[in-house]
Amino acid sequence: MTLSRRPPSRRRLSGRPLLCLPAVILLAAMAGCSSTDASASVAVPHPPEPEAALCRALHKELPKTVAYLDREDPEPRSELTAGWGDAAIVLRCGVPRPERMGDAQADAVEADGVNWMLEERDSGPRFTTTYRATYVEVTMGARFAHDSTPLAQLAAPVKKTIPSSL
């Protein structure tokens, strides 16, 4: 019996094309279905009803644009979430109290009368309101790491609809 030897690169690939085919088809299908105007997906919070009512009121007051980005609410659609600029800025209302909030060394900022706890992340900052009847979280892309414009633009609706807990 004579064995023919193929070059290593061909032998290595010879048994894989059929195994890789489903992955290639899946990637192609995902690429074909995705577009820049598709909404991002975020987890919808599940606050108690009194807090959810505050969040629904906030949802009605949120601006159509933030930092020159148009409103593009994430999926699944909910009155507890909002987004601007295809998830460049995402707001979630009624989130649980962040663990870091108990840290006396946690960074905080104030924007137009609303206090926010800051959490630095590689993907961009996350801010959560402090001293409010429910927690409002705003995540931003890295390009907003040193820009408080979005928080300032969200402050008036938060002050109007989410009472201070002080």
Image (cartoon, rainbow, N blue to C red):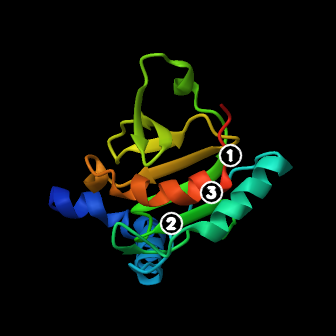
Image quarter for residue 67? bottom left
Report the amino acid beneath label 3: Lys
Image quarter for residue 78? bottom right
SS at mark 3?
helix
Q: Residues within 10 Å of mark 2 (few under 14, many from 20)?
A: many
Q: Which residue is mark 2?
A: 83
Residue 161 in the image, given as x and y percentages of width and height:
67, 56
The residue that appears at 37% across and 69% down in the rendered structure is 17
Q: Which residue is mark 1?
A: 163
Q: Residue furthest bottom?
A: 32
The residue that appears at 56% across and 20% down in the rendered structure is 102
Residue 45 in the image, given as x and y percentages of width and height:
69, 50
Residue 160: image tag = 3
Q: Nearer the viewer, residue 25 or 71?
A: 71
For the residues labelled 1 and 2, the Cα–Cα distance comes to 22 Å
Q: Is residue 134 visible?
A: yes
Report the amino acid beneath label 2: Gly
Quadrant of the image for the N terminus?
Answer: bottom left
The residue that appears at 57% across and 60% down in the rendered structure is 157
Query: Closer to the N terminus: mark 3 or mark 2?
Result: 2
Horizontal side of 98 relative to 123 (left or right) equals right
Q: Residue furthest left?
A: 7
SS at mark 2?
strand
Residue 119 in the image, given as x and y percentages of width and height:
42, 35
55 shown above or below 146: below
